[in-house]
Amino acid sequence: MRFPLLAALLALTASPVLAGDLHLSIAIPRLDVAEYHRPYLAAWIEREDNTVAGQLLVWYQLDKPKARKGEKTAPSEDGRKWLPDLRQWWRRVGRQIETPPDSIAGATRPPATHTLRFARSHAALAELPAGNYRLVVEAAREVGGRELVKIPFQWPAASVSEASAEGTSELGKVELKISP
């Protein structure tokens, strides 16, 4: 008889620690332009005072570019050179790190809707105290534009919570869903 009561008490006391998962959907639109490059993209969580609470992802060119037809060697630069084009992310986080850690880094993505799930154990969410936050998604594209969208949310969510924002050029619809 003590075990069911103990399990119920543990579930009640653990509920703030076991906040839900964060589901993120990011649409990268296909643009009708002469020279298209995949956008660099960063997503992070910021507090109400605009400080960074946690990083979710950074997509950039991970490999060195290959030599073009007729060239003997590939260009010497790698994708990190262009990370400062993600201006808000760079000012708040990027310039403080030499290379984005593997836990958040990834290759650029083609035009499509990309769905990601961040478990409550993800570094950005594991220590996130209860409160009001904003999801920030920034995209920048070579020979293109730059765009930033913000979605306010509350952590942890008492019930399934959904919100979205629509980009106008470099980003399409960005959707956030938090499950308890």
Image (cartoon, helix red, strand yellow):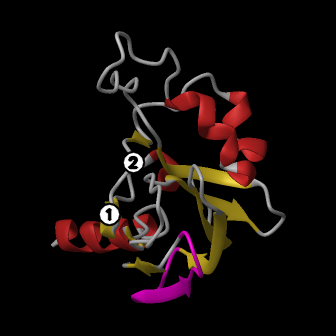
Residue on which the image places disc 2: 108
Q: Does the segment drawn in magenta span residue 120?
A: no
Residue type (three-letter) at the residue carrying disc 2: Thr
Q: Please provide percent x and percent y for residue 103.
A: 40, 37
Q: Does the segment drawn in magenta span residue 159?
A: yes
Q: Please provide percent x and percent y for residue 45.
A: 61, 60
Q: What segment is highlighted magenta in the picture?
A: 156-170
Q: Answer with the quarter of the image where residue 132 lies.
A: bottom right
Q: Circle 1 — which element? A: strand
Q: Answer with the quarter of the image where residue 51 lies.
A: bottom right
Q: Please provide percent x and percent y for residue 75.
A: 47, 18
Residue on which the image places disc 1: 117
SS assignment for the magenta stretch, majority: loop
| Residue in the foreground of this view, choosing between 5 and 117 | 117
Q: Within 10 angstroms of label 2, few (less than 14), some, or many (20 or more) residues?
A: some
Q: Where 94 sits versus 15, above or below?
A: above
Most extreme residue toward the front is 70
**Residue mark closest to the camera, 2 vs 1:** 2
| Residue in the foreground of this view, choosing between 3 and 55 | 55
Looking at the image, is mark 2 or mark 1 earlier in the sequence?
2
Q: Circle 2 — which element? A: loop
Residue type (three-letter) at the residue carrying disc 1: Arg
On screen, residue 122 versus residue 140, left or right, reads left
| Residue in the foreground of this view, choosing between 163 and 3 | 163
